[in-house]
Image (tube, coloured by chain):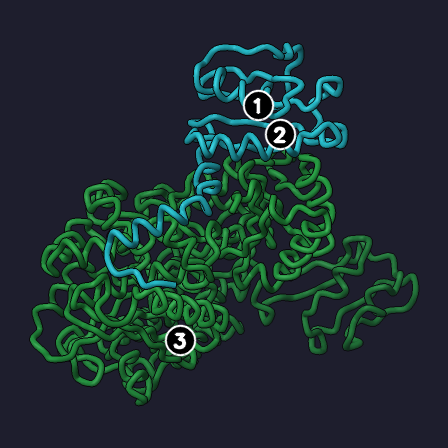
Amino acid sequence: MSKVKTLDDLRKLRDELKSKTTLRDRSENPEGIVQVKVAMATCCIASGSRETMNYLADELEKRNIEAVVTQTGCMGYCYAEPTVEVKMPGKEPIVFGYVNEKKADEIIEKYIRGGELVEGIIPMNYQSIDEDKK
Amino acid sequence: MSDFKIHLLVCGGTGCKASESARVAENLKNEIAGQGLDDFAQVITTGCFGFCEKGPIVKIIPDNTFYTQVSPADAKEIVDEHIVKGRKVERLLYLNPENNERVSDSKGMNFYKKQLRIALRNCGIIDPENIDEYIAREGYEALGKVLSTMTPEEAIAVVKASGLRGRGGAGFPTGLKWELTRQTKSDIKYVVCNADEGDPGAFMDRSILEGDPHSVIEAMAINGYCTGASEGLVYIRAEYPLAIERLKTAIRQAREYGLLGKNIFGTNFSFDITLRYGAGAFVCGEETALIHSMEGLRGEPTLKPPFPSVEGYLKKPTNVNNIETYANIPVIFNKGPEWFASIGTEKSKGTKVFALAGKVNNVGLIEVPMGITLREVIFEIGGGIKNGKKFKAVQTGGPSGGCLTEKHLDTPIDYDNLIAAGSMMGSGGMVVMDEDDCMVDVAKYFLDFTVEESCGKCNPCRIGNKRLYELLDKITKGNGVKEDVDRLINLSNVIKDTSLCMLGGSSPNPVLATIEHFRDEYEAHIIDKRCPAGVCKALMVYSIVEENCVGCTACARACPVGAITGERKQIHIIDQALCIKCGACMDRCKFNAVIVK
């Protein structure tokens, strides 16, 4: 370990280390940033949701988009796995089906960055109890 | 290196470690490795989350899932269900006692809603044994800024502007203390961290050292620069082994990074820290006693002045600050003194950490902005009184403080309000009492502690406290006389006025406060020979109600001393001379025939 000799050294070091704890910082205030939920039940994993989740998390980071990627249980759209729910700040969550890496890339570029909808949206025809309570 | 997608934060504070959190962490690691997910999820041992009531705690990031009372055997289910399949393990989620619903997101817990964490900002978030995680969260930025861009005077001005006051109890303005030490001319000066936390039930300082040791190291270095000291000493009690271990690790890492040692940040400022161990004497929290103990002398206080900032360790100017005070310092420089001063009340800025203990539902470590009310702390954060009992009083300031009652519940908590109410801030112990607590017994408990901990140097404290204890003991045994209450008050005032240090200067506070607020309880003990809360055994009389007794002999068989006599199907009688008041008969009786008065 080379020593920290100046304030700039420290700041450079911090930039390198920052990613270690950004996940924890962001989870403190997820409402203000993009929240991505990847369904991760047996059927989803079998259809490649873990690859999708890794891809989304890595790419969002690379493209400098502040987001928190979490996994969730079965969303019920087993026919359309992997499914991904994206919630932009201040907007209703939207669920996308058949999200492979190509689709994920499209979601990031078009929906998250550009705000335009992409194909593959699954209409939400239920309410979750949690939301109901609020 | 690809970053981890999921962080599993496992509490590694002393409380959770005692309930096997180390094995929880180990099992989680093994299960994750077994699933081939070791580059996906990472297990991190952190400092205290504060929610000690329900430890061990495992928090899963980024979805903020807060698992409570996790046992090593639960690791498999957490990994198989939550980490692999994204399904939360319902049964381990925190159960909100108000509506019996599981709370999955820690932000939804009342315990955290009113808290503001400055001194505890990193506790439960970073790995205290990894300096990189501290640096990633702005660690050592304040030290770098101070050394590279400020003169010592400018830095002291920042601390003064923040309004920070000493968190060890007395509330002396920190910036002023630093300035006094700076102004004393001397070739050698010292900076000391007071880690001698001695109040019964208090664990604020321990938790900071265990959860975020680097914040204390960074602040001590800043203090050294400001006061002109190049040597820092941490006086810590040897009974805090985990805190000592983590502090040593942190010091070693800081040296490796060049953040302690010679020419820090390329300036000509050099600073290093060593540890001094105490044997856990309460009086050594007093700064002059602490300094004597570090010098290898008996831990006894000496008269002030001279203040340590003029003549302290080895007769050199010494700046002594408490751990929590230090933990606030880096934030003040990073966020600005105006930001810090915007929190709190007019004369008490910032936040205060409290160790919430006693009869509340959520026992734990909390940090709240100054000016919050006791009601918010006890009934919202603390979740109210255990078992639906009635709130009676809360002791703040430990054995040196006093009790506050129902009528103080809406008083904003700060240094001055607590003193006005007859108590004090102290280091942050907060013991909640309910209707089942006898206030005479509480006063006796604290006096027992001070008698034990008095160093014996001055007469008022050594003899006076012992006499106070004897008077209280006499009252709880039913031998009190009417004049005793006035005797207690007189003696208390004499001890307060004439003691050498603040140990004796504050030890009668629990007696005075309980007499002021609960004089009726003292009188019940003395005049009616009765303990209203049913705590003082000597005043309790167990008897059998004739109408209810069916003569089943259950009580007689339960009595360990054979004090109950009576034939089968005949009324039983308790021999008061033999009865030891253990209550076994009452527990056993199915007919409510045994009563206690």
The answer to whether marks 2 and 1 mark residues whose Cβ atoms lie closer than 8 Å is yes
What kind of element bears circle 1?
Answer: helix
Please report contact status of discs 1 and 3: CB closer than 8 Å, yes or no. no
Residue A100 coordinates in the image, percent (x, y): 64, 24
Crowding at label 1, few (<14), some or many (≥20) Cα neighbours within 10 Å?
Answer: many
As measured in the structure, the alpha-carbon distance from the residue carrying label 1 to the one carrying label 3 is: 66 Å
Residue beneath label 2, please? A52
Q: Residue at x 56, y 67 (%)?
A: B536
Q: Who's green, chain-wise?
A: B
In which quadrant of the rendered view does residue B546 lie?
A: bottom right
Q: Are marks 2 and 1 on the same chain?
A: yes
Looking at the image, is A88 positioned above or below residue B80? Answer: above
Residue with the mark numbered 3 = B450
Identity, as a three-letter code, of the amino acid under mark 2: Thr
Query: Which residue type does callout 3 highlight?
Result: Thr
Specify whether B291 is left or right of A56.
Answer: left
